[in-house]
Image (cartoon, rainbow, N blue to C red):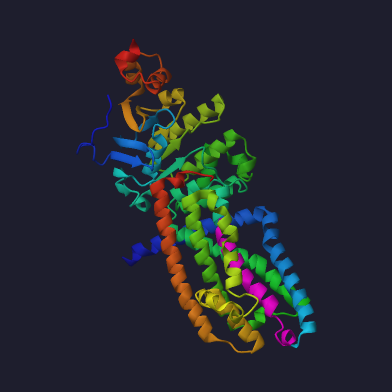
Amino acid sequence: MPNDAMPTAAAVSSDAVIIIDRLVKSYKNSTAVDGVSFTIRRGSVTALLGPNGAGKTTTIATIMGLVTPSSGRVTVLGADMPWQRYQVLHRMNFESPYVDLPMRLTIRENLTVFGMLYGVANLPARIERLAQELDLHALLDRPTGKLSSGQKTRVALAKSLINEPELLLLDEPTASLDPDSADWVRARLEQYRKERQATVLLASHNMAEVERLCDRVIMMKGGRIVDDDTPARLIGRYGRRNLEEVFLDIARGRNEPQEAAQ
Amino acid sequence: MKDQALPARRAAGQRIAAVVLRHLYLLRSSWMRILDLIYWPAVQMLMWGFLQLYVAEHSSFFYRAAGTFIGGMLLWDILFRGQLGFSVSFLEEMYARNLGNIMMSPLRPAEFIAALMAMSLIRLAIGLVPVSLLAIAFFGFNLWGLGLALAAFFVNLIFTSWAVGLFVAGLLLRHGLGAENLAWTFMFLLLPITCVYYPVAVLPEWLQPVAWMLPPTYVFEGMRSLLIAHTFRSDLMIAALALNGAFFAAATVGFYLLLNTARRLGTLVQSGE
């Protein structure tokens, strides 16, 4: 069932990392997000799914404080976004294939710059540890632009983990990776989440990835939430074999579980 | 209270240093970028220097006014290269598709501006110091010999260049790379009006009040006064400083308004044009 009601008082508790309350974002000729509400709890991994134009990117950009809501409220780690964003940005991070790290800088230089921006203590040791964990050690002094796409994704992941964020926002974290590299990245993300009790919100079109990583899926379409549940319950309710088939039902307008199952 | 404020200041300083370091790494990795900082000012200096020599041979006035062309060119370069150093450092983030990473980091807009100012000074120094030494070697014109007057000229010109750079950066945030050409050409609007190579009196009367509204005009008039009449006009420098205060404040307000508009219109999450 869609869970786009206003968050209850219980939801506004200390374990709520993201609270979105009746978020609307309109542009001149269109409404990208239309009255969306949800709460993300600490330590959870949630996927924001939907066809292109569903409003996922705008929702994530609003959570990051890059876009001002037309109406409604977005609270992240207790801060009202975008107005109080600088109180919490050092506790979160993000990765997106639509943003690059400077290509001429080496991996070590890039991680040094972003470590300083995020105020990371004992930065050289942190870079060494990340390089070990993400298998980047041999590449640390190589320019980022001379890496393969799989290696670049690992560097982008290292940048997103440099400050050991409590909240990690991921946009297509395994886009353009071969199955082996993608599996490797997912394993590292799972490991990080378990070790740090981090909260992860990701947008992805890879349904297998979502089934493996996420304990909750928020389905969006046309700027609204059309369903919100665990991957297993969504699959069961729609009478499908996997999340990809559920996604197709929703994307093609067969939103009602009973109708989709027929 | 004081104990809490100190780490916050230190953290801000570290974030500014991070952006400066990012651009120093970039310059270190690219000798073409370094060459680009020196090559065009050197060509300009040689061209104006030889013109000055030629004109001085045929005119007693220009013989007495030695150095006004080459001095004008070097001071114009402080203005132009100062703004370019600011704007190009900003553009490098857009070219690299790194602006999203920067905007999502804890770096505050004021810290970003401070880092771009620092980079403007660094890029200017890389270009101007060798060229000013070449001017001594080729034409015997010693910019550094202007002493305290040079400091007054420099402060006024660099503040104007930062004000223009700040406003252009706001336009780039709001309009994306569609506004890129402004970064390269905006300053040339000031070239004829601020009277780099000729006195304000040469301008049509209706244009002279416009010229006197621009801080660099006072600097170039001050330079001619120093080189021709050997008089340092502190009144001109104070007037330029007051105007620069107003210009810089207006540019800062403009930058923040454009940044807020970019957040409202969602252009911060877009790249390209």
Quadrant of residue B185 within the rendered picture: bottom right
> Could you tell me which residue is drawn at 43 percent across and 63 percent down?
B252
Is residue B225 found left or right of B240 in the rendered image?
A: right
Is residue B136 found left or right of A147 in the rendered image?
A: right
Whether B74 is among the magenta residues is yes
Whether A146 is among the magenta residues is no
What x and y, as percent, mark residue A30?
38, 38
Nearer to me, A213 or A262: A262
Task: Name the quarter where the N terminus of chain B is drawn.
Answer: bottom left
Residue range highlighted in magenta: B61-89
What x and y, as percent, mark residue B4?
34, 62
Is residue A162 found left or right of A214 in the rendered image?
A: right
Nearer to me, A198 or A261: A261
What x and y, as percent, mark residue A19?
29, 40
In the depicted structure, whether residue A250 falls above or below residue B260: above
In the depicted structure, whether residue B195 falls above or below residue A108: below
